Amino acid sequence: MQVHRHEQHITCDIAKTCTLDCFACRRQTYKHRKIPPGGFRGQNMPLSDLEKLCEVYKTVGFCGQVSDPIFHPQFHELLEIMERTGRECHIHTAATSPKLKMDFYEKAFEIHPRGKWFFGLDGLPDESPMYRTNQDGDFLFEAMTKAPNATWQWIVFRFNQDSIDQGKELADKYGIQLQLNYSNRWWGHPADMDYEPTEMYWMAPDTKYTVPRTSTNHYRNWGKDDFELWPKCIHLEQSVAYVNQGFLLPCCWVDGHEYEEDVTVFTQEKFRLENNDHVYDIIQSDEWMQFYDDLIRKPKEAPIECWKHCTNMHDHEKYGKDSRRKRVNL
């Protein structure tokens, strides 16, 4: 079976450190479940791995599953590779550290001026640390205002939903794109009652939509007979991911120790990028082709994450309102 995957974009978890304690982050899940022993894992991406990725992918996203890219000890060198190869980097960051001063960011902006920066500030600078524990919101906001191509990524919570209009005014003042993100990570925990928003700016900036309590997570009680699998990796709706163990995965959603039994085929030592001359040696291997073939021919055997993220539950007429994460650019 020949699977046609786009070569436009790849997401990469390039480091192994984050200073934040965001309660819904997968990193916290690992830590509390002690998966693996000690609660965390990974390595910093070797420069040679990025060189190989730039041979194939036109844009590379530094978007950590369990880390923040700014903590890679050779972060500036990675940006130099992006600039030298003519590729474009998308840097997603939310963490801060007293060790990283403003000149660290200014140097990064200078090295790769075409890079696009996405700053995770969930609300106004003094509101964001309510979720982004340990974040210096004022410092990160200042860094965002200095970035040449900045997007303000604002996860909407109950505590910041009434500040959106003020955030839009600030974004316009500094020439920043404001992007509202509506999470689907509401699992019925008691804390959800305090954080889950009650309103949405729905599709149009001037339109507010009241959110029913249970609408954001249709797969709380689902079965594989309830939906049809629609693999986004095959239909070019989701990019390949590089995880901070040095492996490639069909997407970032299957990166997780609690699901390792489903994806161990991808984390064999022979598939570590350092052990291969070219990305194609991995993504065009027999094992990868078999995985894609099985998604189509034997969907009921697909990993649980595929069923959580890649079904037709987003069919409005059949299943009601879309349960996927929303992004609204203001």
Image: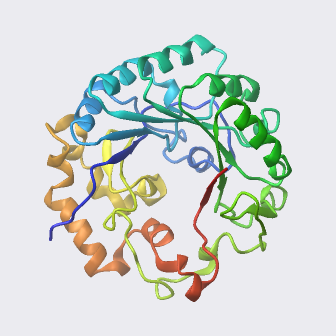
The answer to which quarter of the image holds residue 18 is top right
The residue located at (38%, 55%) in the rendering is 251
Which residue is at the front of the view, 258 or 230?
A: 230
Q: Is residue 318 in view?
A: yes
Which image quarter is the N terminus in? bottom left
Asked if 299 appears above or below 61 in the picture, the reply is below
Name the residue rendered at 65%, 63% in the picture: 203
Q: Indicate left or right for 246 with 62 as reference.
A: left
The picture places residue 23, in percent across and down from the top left corner, at 69, 47
Q: Is residue 217 left or right of residue 214?
A: left
Q: Please tell me whether residue 178 is drawn above or below residue 157 in the rendered image.
A: above
Count of residue discs: 0
Q: Residue at x 51, y 42 (%)?
A: 37
x 21%, y 53%: residue? 283
Decide which of 154, 263 is in the foreground and name it. 154
Give left or right: position of 314 versus 263.
Answer: right
Q: Is residue 147 above or below residue 251?
A: above
Q: Is residue 139 left or right of residue 10?
A: right
182 or 204, which is in the foreground?
A: 204
The answer to whether any part of residue 96 appears in the image is no
* Image coords of residue 163 (percent x, y): 83, 46
| Colour scheme of the picture | rainbow
| Residue 60 picture location, percent across and down | 37, 39
Q: Position of residue 72 (x, y in %)?
A: 46, 24
